[in-house]
Amino acid sequence: MGSLIKIIFPDGKEREYPADVTARDIIKEFDKGLLKTSVAAEVNGRYVDLSSPLHEDSVIKPIAVDSKEGLEIYRHSASHVMAQAVKELFGDVKVAIGPAIEDGFYYDFDSSRPFIPEDLEKIEKRMQEIVKKDIRIERRDLSKKEALEFFGSMGESYKQELINEIPEDKVSVYKQDGFADLCRGSHLPSTGWIKAFKLTSIAGAYWRGNEKNKMLQRIYGTAFPTKKELDDYLYRIEEAKKRDHRKLGKELDLFSINDDVGAGLVCWHPSGAIVRGIIEDFWKKEHYKHGYQIIYTPHIAKVDLWKTSGHWDFYRENLYSPMDIEGQDFIVKPMNCPFHIQIYQSRLRSYRDLPIRYAELGTVYRFERSGVLHGLLRVRGFTQDDAHIFCRPDQLEEEIGNVLNFTLYILRSFGFNTYDIYLSTRPEKFVGTLDNWAKAEDALRSALEKTGIPFQVDPGEGVFYGPKIDIKIKDVLDRAWQCSTIQVDFNLPQRFNVTCRGEDGKEHQPIMIHRALMGSLERFFGVLIEHYAGAFPLWLAPVQAVILTVTEKNNDYAQQVYNALRGHDIRAELDIRNEKLGLKIREAQLKKIPYMLVIGNSEEEKRVVAPRARSGNTLEPMTVEAFIGLVDTTVNSKQ
RNA sequence: GCCGGCGUAGCUCAGGGGCAGAGCAGCUGAUUCGUAAUCAGCAGGUCAAGGGUUCAAUUCCCUUCGCCGGCUCCA
């Protein structure tokens, strides 16, 4: 008291203040208007409440409600308001944790009675009341002992458990009315700040994410600074649902997953199969170009193969049970690698032969727990675009670089230009030598750096047998799906005793690289459907053009046009039904067919077609040859 | 696997202890039509499956299967 501290403003100016000045006072003096939009302040790199007194020389920066940090604070306070509402409405609940998340917030409760959807409305209503009361949110710093007693007296055992794990002596508690929560902060000044929120769903969630613990009830919600932003968000969610590949898959007749067949097993319908066929053809052509050899291997094999590989021990949970064939156990394959190794080992290999790159569109089956299945994105049977590269240590870096560039080239061909890339390094349990790991990690890292694309390192997240690069693609609901993976493997070559004859005439062990570019065709197709909202670009579209007649009088000419297109390998359909043009266009539009070729009397007279693009644009009438040329150019550019 | 919700015609969905409903799609007929729905008629069902309660179950209860939202898991 009496002493002064030096404050550095956001604009760099300095001024002195008494030592108990609050962040609010300073921001107010700096810019009064700013106070209305600031939810907290960043002081010396730490977030503090506006009401916190500053005790030392500080660099201060207001946190705006619409900044990333501000929104997080805003939502975190919204989750506290929800918890208060729940505690008020349902007396016997205990609170667990309630953070802000990417699109909103959640809070986990331990409640003897499960929440039902109607409860959400009740809770929302109570939240409105709490917001209306504009209750001050106050911070109190307590010693751990005080905090333990405080939460103990309320029976909040989860909070006690959390307190016990906090290393510092002091903890902070945020209070609003009778509700108090253990929380690092910071928070909004009062509940009245919360303008727009909505509770979205109820779900079970294990305490601390561990399935051995009790399952709690989680309520998800979201909050935005304005009603408009909330509405926009909810609208975006609705729009995203329209792109859901499960919905579009049915509407566009692309695939089905049928109870009678079994959960997680995909049937590709003709239209979906055409897209898959095009993807596969493209994939094969590019693999030959990039020095791969394409192979085929069986769907079942003796279980011993997977005992040797180690999968039988490590991943038994995910393998289907063996079937007895003439007294020997066979299983349906969960991976392709052992077969590729067998092919490698079918004769003696020289170091001169390496690298050997075997690629296969291999269909594998893995048991996934029923709760995790999800359309095409998480299934029990799928086709990997798999490859195994056997190379010498000195070839590793170049091979990884090639694979990475190849992957990006393929993904870009399908219109995917942004990804999340992760480099996972050596975990605690690992096989192979430290030296090899270091070399492999360096090879992966340097290959990634050469692409210039940002990536994230996940320390210790590698598989036990080697480091890896994962590339994730985001779907429209912003869920990230792993497609591409590049993994170095020191383990399998050892287990199968994979060797090559070296320059010195002795046996050497090559390194194996596992890689999948699209991951699985099923998942990739699912992501593709959502990416394009079912409106596939011309080169992938199951039907590229449909010929629509105005009346039956034009049938003969329409048939000639159809034959011409078919003759040029254009996937065309002929709609000569006795229906009005408007209906035919509507139906073609709903099927998302790229081009509709309208043929009436005037087109027939001039021997032309009148194309209408999927966008709704009508093009100038053109000859069939001109249209074929247009299709060829567009297909070649993959637009 | 766990928590919650759901399962009715090919699709989207309403209904509800006492004869099972609509729209679209389908079929038949009429209509010959110019850029997102022509009109009329007909047909369509073990109400997911199995068990229980009841005079009576599609409806209420239990089990199983599947789907949806999460959790956990994901070589």
Image: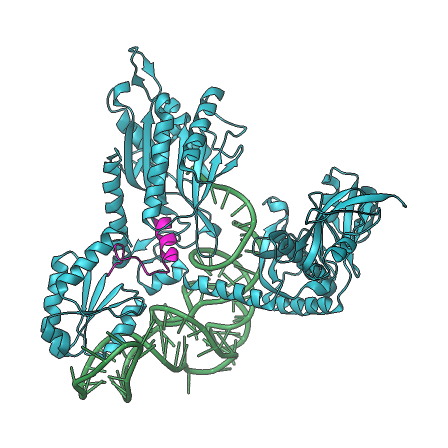
Question: What shade has chain B been given?
Answer: green
What residue span does the magenta drawing correspond to?
A522-543
Q: In the shown orientation, is residue A141 left or right of residue A549?
A: right
Q: Is residue A111 something that shows in the picture?
A: no
Answer yes or no: is residue A230 visible. yes
Residue A533 sits inside the magenta stretch: yes
Residue A87 placed where, x, y %? 73, 61
Does residue A465 lie above or below A45 as drawn?
Answer: above
Q: With A610 as the anchor, is A355 left or right in this view? A: right
Which quadrant of the structure image shows residue A187?
Answer: bottom right
From the viewer's perspective, is A310 left or right of A594?
A: right
In depth, the one of A29 and A112 nearer the eye is A29
The cyan-coloured chain is labelled A
Q: As drawn, which residue projects farthest toward the right?
A: A2
Instruction: Decide if residue B41 is on the left or right side of residue A162.
Output: left
Most foreground residue, A452 or A569: A452
Q: Residue at x 20, y 59 (%)?
A: A630
Quarter-wise, where is residue A301 in the image?
top left
Out of A289 and A82, give the one closest to the viewer: A289
Residue A178 drawn in magenta? no
Residue at 69 percent across and 46 percent down: it is A12
